[in-house]
Image (cartoon, rainbow, N blue to C red):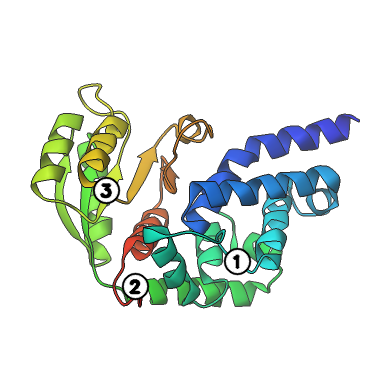
């Protein structure tokens, strides 16, 4: 009984991050959460995939991938608009590339762990990750606005974003400055911290920009990711925890712009 309780506690602790991964993979909170719920139900019915894996976390994601693969890697049918266009764009990627890249960069699994999750060889996973980077790097460059009050971090993010071929429209240190900058020069993507210099909120700034523009891809970078992973309100598809690494930012920016782009899509 105590072992079952320990496994349940471990799964519960990892579930918010599985939901983050599922949303980033599908491009939709609703669809991602459906896959996460299905994964949890499968684990509750049969925990062997978790107990027989190298770790509970690997086993949880491995169970998710078995469900994801058996469903044909499809977002729920009936999607329209931007999400439907994103799905058609994803359909043109080499199978397994985004999964391998997200698992290794955003979720920070080693290539050996990714291989276990996806039931591939380590060599195959390495090639999938490189292929994902190449396929998404071929897309048009985007314009990125940074909301970050710490100068060194802001400069680091600017260097990473510029280094992969995107233009930084500006850096804002407060919510009011972010709203002003965003409305004056609409970005293709917002990279936002949550707690800003004057105790204002990056979330509030983003919400005001979303209200103004309608849709706008956002990546939050925060030291407190669990505060946004509650399931109680709309959540960002991409959420990076501080301290971040360069590969996480590169991957999130590339994939967020890739999902939001409508170029080369036949309607």
Residue 237 screen position, x and y as percent: 44, 48
Q: What residue is pinned by disc 3? A: 190
User: Disc 2 or 3, which lies upstream in sequence?
Assistant: 2
Is 219 displayed left or right of 198 in the figure? right
Q: Compare residues 204 and 131 and report the one nearer the observer.
A: 204
User: Disc 1 or 3, which lies upstream in sequence?
Assistant: 1
Q: What residue is pinned by disc 1? A: 73
Q: How many marks?
A: 3
Q: Mark 2, residues whose alpha carbon is within 10 Å: few (<14), some, or many (≥20)?
A: some
Looking at the figure, which quarter contains the C terminus?
bottom left
Gap between marks 1 and 3 measured at Cα: 27 Å
Q: What residue is pinned by disc 2? A: 137
Residue 154 screen position, x and y as percent: 23, 44
Q: Nearer the viewer, mark 2 or mark 1?
A: 1
Q: Looking at the rendering, which quadrant does residue 252 occupy?
A: bottom left
Residue 25 screen position, x and y as percent: 51, 58
Gap between marks 2 and 1 measured at Cα: 22 Å
| Residue 104 seen | yes
């Amino acid at each position: 009984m105590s072992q079952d309780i320990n496994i349940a506690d471990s799964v519960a602790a990892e579930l918010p991050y599985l939901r983050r991964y599922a949303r980033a993979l599908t491009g939709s909170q609703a669809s991602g959460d459906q896959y996460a719920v299905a994964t949890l139900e499968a684990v509750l019915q049969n925990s062997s995939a978790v107990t027989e894996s190298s770790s509970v976390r690997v086993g949880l994601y491995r169970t998710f991938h078995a469900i994801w693969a058996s469903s044909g890697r499809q977002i729920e049918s009936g999607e329209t608009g931007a999400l439907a266009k994103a799905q058609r764009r994803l359909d043109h990627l080499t199978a397994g590339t985004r999964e391998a890249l997200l698992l290794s960069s955003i979720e920070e699994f080693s290539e050996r762990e990714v291989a276990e999750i996806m039931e591939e060889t380590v060599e195959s996973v390495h090639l999938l990750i490189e292929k994902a980077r190449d396929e998404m790097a071929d897309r048009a460059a985007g314009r990125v606005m940074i909301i970050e009050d710490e100068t060194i971090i802001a400069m680091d993010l600017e260097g990473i974003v510029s280094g992969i071929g995107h233009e930084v429209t500006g850096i804002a240190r407060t919510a009011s400055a972010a709203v002003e900058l965003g409305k004056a020069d609409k970005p293709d993507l917002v990279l936002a911290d949550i707690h800003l210099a004057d105790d204002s909120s990056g979330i509030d700034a983003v919400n005001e920009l979303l209200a103004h523009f309608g849709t706008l891809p956002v990546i939050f970078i925060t030291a407190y990711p669990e505060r946004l992973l509650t399931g109680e309100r709309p959540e960002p598809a991409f959420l990076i925890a501080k301290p971040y690494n360069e590969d996480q930012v590169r991957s999130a920016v590339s994939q967020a712009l890739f999902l939001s782009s409508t170029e080369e899509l036949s309607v």
